Image (cartoon, rainbow, N blue to C red):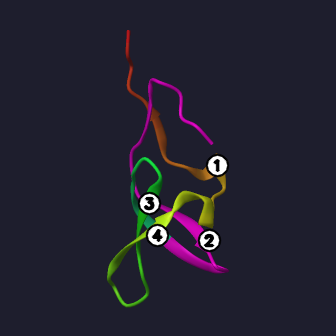
Amino acid sequence: MELDEDEVLIDEFEAILDGERVKITAVLERTCVYVHEDGERRLVRKEELWVEADKLPIRSRGLP
C-alpha cells in the first residue's frame, strides 16, 4: 500500500511477522522498525510484514 502525497501515519500499528503479531514503531523507505518480544527494536523488510491496510492510523496533512 502506498500513501497519498498528503497522507501520513500518525501512530504505531500492528502487523504480522512470521505468524506473530508485532508493533511497528517507524516506517522507513524499504524497512520498518518493530518491537521484538524481548523489548528490542529491530528492522524488518516491508515485504516480510502483513498489515490490514484499513486499520492503519492515517491522517491527511492538509496540504494545499
Residue 51 percent location from the top left of the image:
63, 58
According to the picture, the residue beneath numbered tag 1 turns out to be 53
Residue 40 percent location from the top left of the image:
32, 82
Dot 4: what SS?
strand
Q: Residue at x 46, y 70 (%)?
A: 23
Q: Residue at x 38, y 26 (%)?
A: 61
Alpha-carbon distance for marks 3 and 1? 15 Å
Asked if the stretch drawn in magenta spans residue 42, the answer is no
Sequence-wise, the earlier of marks 4 and 3 is 4
Question: Disc 4 vs disc 3: Cβ atoms closer than 8 Å?
Answer: no
4 vs 3, front mark: 3
Task: Establish if 46 lies above or below 5.
Answer: below
According to the picture, the residue beneath numbered tag 4 turns out to be 23
**Could you say which disc has been placed on residue 6 in the image?**
none
Sequence-wise, the earlier of marks 4 and 1 is 4
Q: Residue at x 60, y 52 (%)?
A: 55
Sequence-wise, the earlier of marks 3 and 1 is 3
Sequence-wise, the earlier of marks 4 and 2 is 2
Dot 2: what SS?
strand
How would you rate the neighbour count of disc 2 (Cα within 10 Å): few for under 14, some for 14-19, many for 20 or more?
A: some
- Over which residues does the magenta segment extend? 1-22
Asked if the stretch drawn in magenta spans residue 19, the answer is yes
3 vs 2, front mark: 3
Q: Given the image, on which type of amino acid does mark 3 rest?
A: Cys
Question: Disc 3 vs disc 2: Cβ atoms closer than 8 Å?
Answer: no
Sequence-wise, the earlier of marks 2 and 1 is 2
Alpha-carbon distance for marks 4 and 2? 9 Å
